[in-house]
Image: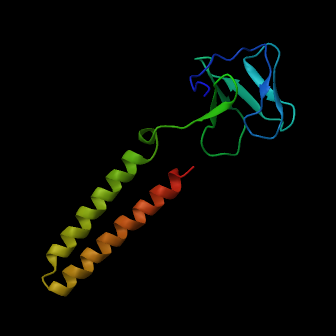
Amino acid sequence: MRPQKPVKIDLSNDYPCPCRRRGRLLPIVLTEAFGCDRCQQIFVVEENGQTIEQLSSSYPYKRSWRWTGYRWMVVRPNLGDGYLPMMSGMIVVLLIGWLLLALRSSASLSIIIWITLTGLLVILSAMIFWLAYRR
């Protein structure tokens, strides 16, 4: 099995395109960037020299790859860098609000309805989170 360790990218070599369109990444003269001869995308070499990032894209997140010596591996951002802290905080605030409203009402049927709505809110939030991070 081949190693998965990142290898430093040589700016004078050409590499296969990470977009899987059978193109070749060719170095752009006087820059630390590569251009694909097939899909016309531009990729910039990051400071560590082991990762490239797609420069122009309609993709909402930065797409990055690292070279392992024989193929590109997608660099996935950490969950903590994105929406995880914000979404967790929102869920906690909403749950506390729902439970306070449930405790205010005194009827037992009303408490069951509020707890059911709280559970549905948790399930909906978990599904949204899963859909956002299932790449």
Q: Nearer the viewer, residue 5 or 32?
A: 5
Question: Residue at coordinates 42% horizontally, 67% vertically from top-left?
Answer: 124
Residue at the image point whose x is 72% and y is 17% from the top:
32
Number of numbered discs: 0
View extreme (right): residue: 37
Q: Name the residue furthest front.
A: 1
Res 126 quadrant in image: bottom left
Q: In x, y percent, where is residue 83?
A: 44, 47
> Closer to the camera, 117 or 90?
117
Which quarter of the figure has residue 17? Answer: top right
Quadrant including the N terminus: top right
| Direction from residue 122 to residue 14 in the image, left or right | right
Does 125 sit left or right of 3 as displayed? left
User: In the rendered image, which quarter is residue 99 located in?
Assistant: bottom left
Q: By what rule are the colours in the image chosen? A: rainbow
Residue 91 % position (x, y) = 33, 58
**Residue 114, how many percent across, how many down?**
25, 77
80 to 33, vertically: above or below: below
Q: Is residue 49 left or right of residue 103?
A: right
The single residue placed furthest to the left in the displayed view is: 106
In depth, the one of 3 and 50 nearer the eye is 3
Q: Relative to 35, is 135 above or below?
A: below
> In the visual, does 103 lie left or right of 75?
left
Please give the name of the residue rendered at 58% of the width and 17% of the height, measured from the top-left corner. 48
Q: Nearer the viewer, residue 73 or 65?
A: 73
Q: Position of residue 31 (x, y in %)?
A: 76, 16
Residue depicted at 47% across the width and 60% down the height: 128
Q: Is residue 2 above or below residue 97?
A: above
